[in-house]
Amino acid sequence: MMTLIRPLALAAALLCAAGAASAGTASVSFANPDQFADLPRDAYQREQVLADLGEHFGALAAKLPAGQEMKVEVLDVDMAGRSWPGGWGMRELRVLDGGADWPHIKFRYTISHDGKVVKGGDEMLHSMDYLSRLNRYSSGDTLRYEKQMLDTWFKTLTAVR
């Protein structure tokens, strides 16, 4: 299954980045997604979460100046809430209680321009107050809290100092 997830998520991220020819681009990979702390158990749902995450990194990279490239290797994901298996033929449910169920994403990234690395590092993002913050993403978005967390990181990363 791991070989199927990586190309799908990478293709989604590259397609998203390719749509903005004058903006930055992204390449996203997932290191051992079968070992991630918390992803859906269902293979289709799991694949969709990884593809959506790859697309979101691509959307962030599209905001970079032209000629810049962001490479991301996602090392671990722990989605907001806790998973409860669905009944026969039903999707699993995510229960969010605002306790110790906040989202975490661990990744390694570099941003380069003309082959020269201008920023990079290892990140371990978490959002302990994820339920008490305003969120611009739809309540139906599976990764609404993770996307918000990544948006905050990216905004801080690209802020003019």
Image: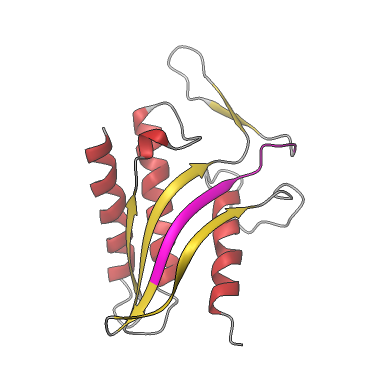
Q: Position of residue 117 (x, y in %)?
A: 36, 79
Is 155 in front, or is 87?
A: 155
Image quarter in which the C terminus is found: bottom right
At horizontal 33% and vertical 64% (from top left) the residue drawn is 16
Check the image and name the residue furthest to the top. Answer: 88
Magenta highlight on residue 76: no
Q: Which residues are magenta?
A: 99-110
Check the image and name the residue furthest to the bottom. Answer: 161
Image quarter in which the N terminus is found: top left
At horizontal 58% and vertical 55% (from top left) the residue drawn is 125
On screen, residue 122 above or below 99: below
Q: Position of residue 29 (x, y in %)?
A: 32, 53
Quarter residue 149 falls in: bottom right
Quarter residue 98 falls in: top right
Does 2 sit left or right of 141 as displayed? left
The total number of labels drawn is 0
